[in-house]
Amino acid sequence: DVKVTQSSRYLVKRTGEKVFLECVQDMDHENMFWYRQDPGLGLRLIYFSYDVKMKEKGDIPEGYSVSREKKERFSLILESASTNQTSMYLCASSFQFSYEQYFGPGTRLTVT
Amino acid sequence: AQRVTQPEKLLSVFKGAPVELKCNYSYSGSPELFWYVQYSRQRLQLLLRHISRESIKGFTADLNKGETSFHLKKPFAQEEDSAMYYCALPMDSSYKLIFGSGTRLLVRP
């Protein structure tokens, strides 16, 4: 069974704080993704990584950065959190040539 | 540019009624299309893909290239079908996906 885990289910941070969201998958997937999930907007891709140290911007990368130092781990970084980054963050992974993405449970981030 | 449109935010039906969740897309070429589902307190997961032409949990979806649609259908809705449903298609030629805004299906007893 594919397992994608995220470091926190709920997180509350203050405006201006640096925030790290961690994602780990145990199926040796090449691709990893970070999404925001907002009501009425669906899932929007923040960043995508197709290999260690490789990354591509998604639709809404502003205010975010990512790190992939190991194949199984993909981190999302909010350099200076703002209230408009309050959202549900979903991590996903997939094999290199597959559209089937496996999702983590999500992290609900609140920035006050 | 690729785009996925799910026109209904909420679809409410009674148990046993037919269900159709709408999905329209714009894509140059022949797309692969997918339906993902998120049940309450569960992870988002793949429900079905058009290329497999299979029925999952009684749901089917037919790709209509003329109408650029990929509607999800079930003849008799069950309460356990209540969930958030997302239509998705590939983003350009990569293995990234574009998701629609989602439709919440509520099946009432």
Image (cartoon, rainbow, N blue to C red):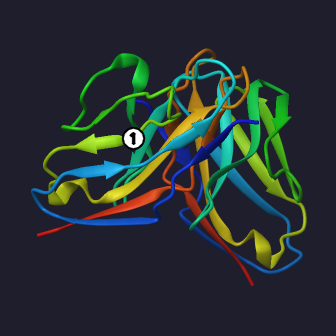
Q: Please state which of residues A25 and A109 is positioned toward the viewer in this rendering.
A: A109
Q: Is residue A24 visible?
A: no
Image spot of residue A82 (x, y percent): 84, 74
Is residue B5 rendered to the left or right of residue B59?
Answer: right
Q: In the image, residue A66 lies at what x, y percent?
A: 82, 44
Residue at x 73%, y 26% (from the top left corner): B92
| Quarter in which the C terminus of chain A is drawn | bottom right
The residue tagged 1 is B71
Residue A12 coordinates in the image, percent (x, y): 67, 77
- Write down the chain letter for disc 1: B
Furthest-bottom residue in this view: A112
- Identify which residue is drawn at 65% across, 21% down: A30
Residue under the image location 18 percent in, 51 percent down: B18
In the rendered image, the residue lying farthest to the top is A97
Q: Is residue A68 above or below residue A99?
A: below
Q: Is residue A58 left or right of residue B101?
A: right
Q: Secondary structure at mark 1?
A: loop
Q: Is residue B109 above or below residue A44?
A: below
| Amino acid type at mark 1 | His
Toward the front, the furthest residue is B66
The image shows a total of numbered marks equal to: 1
Relative horizontal placement of residue A63, taking residue A98 as reference (left or right):
right
Quarter where residue B84 is shown: bottom left
Quadrant into which the N terminus of chain A falls:
top left
